[in-house]
Amino acid sequence: MAGHSKWANIQHRKGRQDKLRSKLFSKLAKEITVAAKMGDPDPEKNPRLRLAVKEAKSNSCPKDVIDRAIKKSQGGDAENYDEIRYEGYGPGGIAVIVEAMTDNRNRTASTVRSTFTKNGGNLGETGSVAFMFDRMGEIVYPASVADADTVMMAAIEAGAEDVQSDADNHVIYCADTDLAEVSHALEPALGESISTKLIWKPNMTTEVDAEGLTKLMKLLDTLEDDDDVQRVTANFEASDAVMAAFSES
């Protein structure tokens, strides 16, 4: 898998997960609040909220954090967040998409632009790299749930478009507008997924060496550490040898 999925594995191997957990919970809660404010506060009546709650639960987000986020959306003091997408190039010409939710567009734009510049990249116009990605739904199951053929058949019957299986996971892709429906249809056969979310899936990738990966990861990590940034995706590809070298560094 390219881009963000491989990057998540790197973060896990380098032990960053615990440090990022509280920040992750905050970002998941923000998505829940926005989804609930835009629609019905009942997840069963609001597909976006249902997916946001499911993603939070799959990341072990405490129930009280989820409940507070939904309750916050109904209060008069709930912040108004704008959803913004930034696009640019990182070191080595790697395409990067940054998804943000912010209550201050100027602050976020300034921070994102500065982060790109300081880390060997440059921020582009909207649409400058989006053509290198497809907006899709991604549903992830552990490899232990079933063999690849069984998962493939279940995915086809549920209306998915593609499945990629490896030693760790089965990753099921579907049209972005079908995510809630396909996810729900998979549960009778495969149970609860590890992750269910909308992603930017690279349709073309650029290979990076160990030095390039180190520089790129510095940019991606700095972007993700920003409280206004919800998700960052890049279209890099790295060999197993480069991944191993980076994980040990």
Image: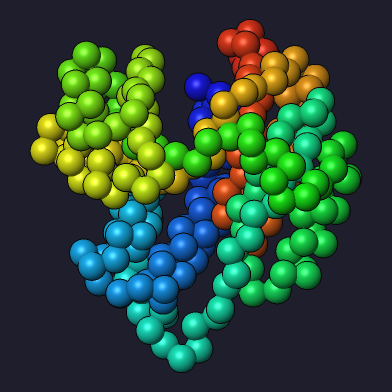
How many numbered dots are placed on residues in this image?
0
User: Which x, y percent locates residue 182?
Assistant: 25, 41
User: Which x, y percent locates residue 125?
Assistant: 78, 50
Image point (40%, 44%), residue name: 176
Q: Quadrant of residue 83?
A: bottom right
Question: As drawn, is 96 to the left or to the right of 139?
Answer: right
Residue 19 seen in render: yes
Quarter of the image for the C terminus: give it: top right
55, above or below 17, in the image? below
Residue 62 seen in render: no
Question: As drawn, is 49 to the left or to the right of 238?
Answer: left
| Camera-nearest residue between 194 and 39 | 39
User: Which x, y percent locates residue 149?
Assistant: 22, 14
User: Which x, y percent locates residue 235?
Assistant: 64, 29
108, above or below 233, in the image? below
21, above or below 68, in the image? above
| Camera-nearest residue between 29 and 155 | 155
Question: As drawn, is 15 to the left or to the right of 164?
Answer: right
Which residue is farthest left?
Answer: 188
Image point (77%, 68%), residue name: 107
Question: As drawn, is 70 to the left or to the right of 26?
Answer: left
Image point (29%, 66%), residue name: 46
Which residue is farthest bottom?
Answer: 76
Image point (82%, 53%), residue name: 113
Q: Quadrant of residue 90?
A: top right
In this figure, which colouring scheme has been used for the structure? rainbow
Which residue is farthest top?
Answer: 241
